[in-house]
Image (tube, rainbow, N blue to C red):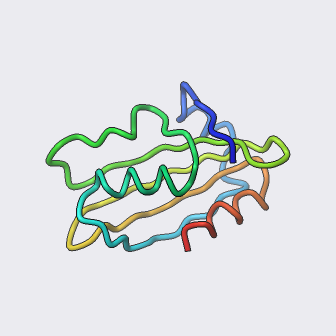
């Protein structure tokens, strides 16, 4: 995966559309949203967009936007919605111009 900055992540998200999309929910064993954001960025190897790598202090939820280019030049976008309770619940949505890229990126979290 190659990091790529998308200056307007939402426009790119809409442009790719939901044809090649996977969504799943996870429970993360991390103490803070900041820790979760750092780990997800590191683990996915993708570029944070829209300043979403910065978590507002004392918030109980956060959305992380990531962008990258997968083998073959396929754009991949990830939206990770997180909510803090006893642990961190994360709804991960992956979109790409290529279905196999979606499968690989989504399975990376499992």
Residue, x 29% and y 51% (percent of image)?
A: 34
Residue, x 20% and y 73% (percent of image)?
A: 86
In the rendered image of this protein, does residue 66 appear above or below residue 32?
A: above
Residue, x 44% and y 63% (percent of image)?
A: 91
Q: Nearer the viewer, residue 54 or 85?
A: 54
Q: Residue furthest right?
A: 72
From the viewer's perspective, tell me whether residue 101 is left or right of residue 21.
right
From the viewer's perspective, tell me whether residue 55 is left or right of residue 46.
left
Q: Position of residue 54 (x, y in %)?
A: 32, 38
Q: Position of residue 23 (x, y in %)?
A: 56, 65
Q: How many marks?
A: 0
Q: Residue furthest left?
A: 58
Q: Position of residue 35 (x, y in %)?
A: 31, 55
Q: Nearer the viewer, residue 79 or 87?
A: 87
Residue 3, quarter of picture: top right
In the rendered image of this protein, does residue 11 appear above or below residue 63?
A: above
Q: Position of residue 55 (x, y in %)?
A: 28, 43
Q: Quadrant of the C terminus?
A: bottom right
In the rendered image of this protein, does residue 79 appear above or below residue 16?
A: below
From the viewer's perspective, tell me whether residue 72 is left or right of residue 110.
right
Residue, x 40% and y 32% (percent of image)?
A: 51
Q: Residue furthest top?
A: 7
From the viewer's perspective, tell me whether residue 37 is left or right of residue 103.
left
Residue 12, quarter of picture: top right
């Amino acid at each position: 995966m190659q990091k790529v900055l998308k200056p307007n992540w939402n426009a790119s998200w809409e442009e790719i559309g939901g044809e090649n999309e996977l969504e799943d929910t996870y429970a993360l064993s991390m103490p803070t949203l900041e820790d979760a954001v750092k780990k997800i960025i590191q683990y996915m190897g993708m570029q944070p967009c829209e300043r979403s790598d910065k978590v507002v202090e004392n918030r109980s939820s956060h959305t992380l936007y990531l962008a990258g280019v997968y083998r073959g030049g396929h754009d991949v976008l990830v939206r990770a919605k997180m909510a803090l309770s006893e642990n961190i619940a994360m709804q991960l949505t992956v979109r790409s111009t290529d279905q196999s890229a979606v499968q690989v990126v989504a399975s990376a979290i499992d």
